[in-house]
Amino acid sequence: MDWLLCFCAWLITFVSTLGSLFFSYVMEFAPCVLCWYQRICLFPLVLILARGLFPFDPKASKYALPLAGVGWCLAAYHSLLYAEWIPADMQPCTQGISCTEVHIELFGFLSIPYLSLIAFTLLSAILIVLQRRTPV
C-alpha cells in the first residue's frame, strides 16, 4: 500500500512536470516569477520520488515533503493573487510576465495557478500520509 501511495505521488509530480513543460514549450506560455519558483519545488520531486520507488524507500517522503510544502505555499499565494484576494501592489511579478495573466482556463475556472495548487495539495496530503506510516 505504501509503495502505491509513493507511486501516486510520483505520478502527480511527473504529470505536473510534463504539463508545465507542455504549457511552456508547446503552448508557448511564458512562466511568471511565481511559476518558476513552483517549478523549482516540483521538478526535483520527480527524481526524489522515483528514487524512493526503486527499491522502495518509505523515507523518501521525508525528503520530498519540505519541497512539496514550500511549493504548496507558493501555489496558494499565487492562487490568492490570481483570485485578486491579495492586492496588486503586493505582487512579486512587477517586471515581465504578470502572475495574474489568464493563459488558459479548463472547464471555465481551472487556471494554471489553481492546477498547481491542486497538484501540490494532493502531493502534500499523500506525503503526509506516507510520513505518518513510516516508522522513525
Image (spheres, rainbow, N blue to C red):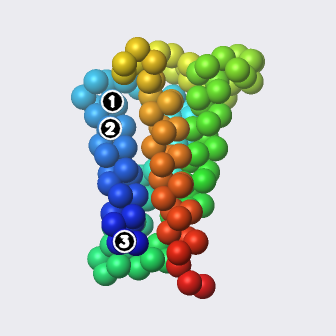
Taking the image as shown, residue 58 lies to the left or right of residue 106, namely right
**Which residue shows up at 56% across the image and 84% down it?**
135
Which secondary structure, mark 1? helix
Give the alpha-carbon distance from disc 2 to disc 3, as whole Å: 27 Å
Total numbered badges shown on the rendered structure = 3
**Which residue shows up at 29% across the image and 77% down it?**
54
Q: Earlier in the sequence, mark 2 or mark 3?
A: 3
* Residue 129 image offset from top left, x and y in percent: 53, 65
Which secondary structure, mark 2? helix
Q: Nearer the viewer, mark 2 or mark 3?
A: 3
Question: Can the viewer see residue 29 in this picture?
Answer: yes
Out of 42 and 115, give the one closest to the viewer: 115
- Residue under label 1: 23
Out of 3 and 111, give the one closest to the viewer: 3
* Residue 87 image offset from top left, x and y in percent: 74, 18
- For the residues labelled 1 and 2, say whether their Cβ atoms are less than 8 Å apart: yes
Task: Point out the residue furthest to the front here.
Answer: 1
Task: Point out the residue furthest to the left here.
Answer: 26
Q: Amino acid at mark 2?
A: Gly
Q: Which mark is residue 19?
A: 2
Q: Amino acid at mark 3?
A: Met
Instruction: For label 3, count other residues whose C-alpha is less than 10 Å away and answer few (under 14), some (14-19) or many (20+).
Output: few
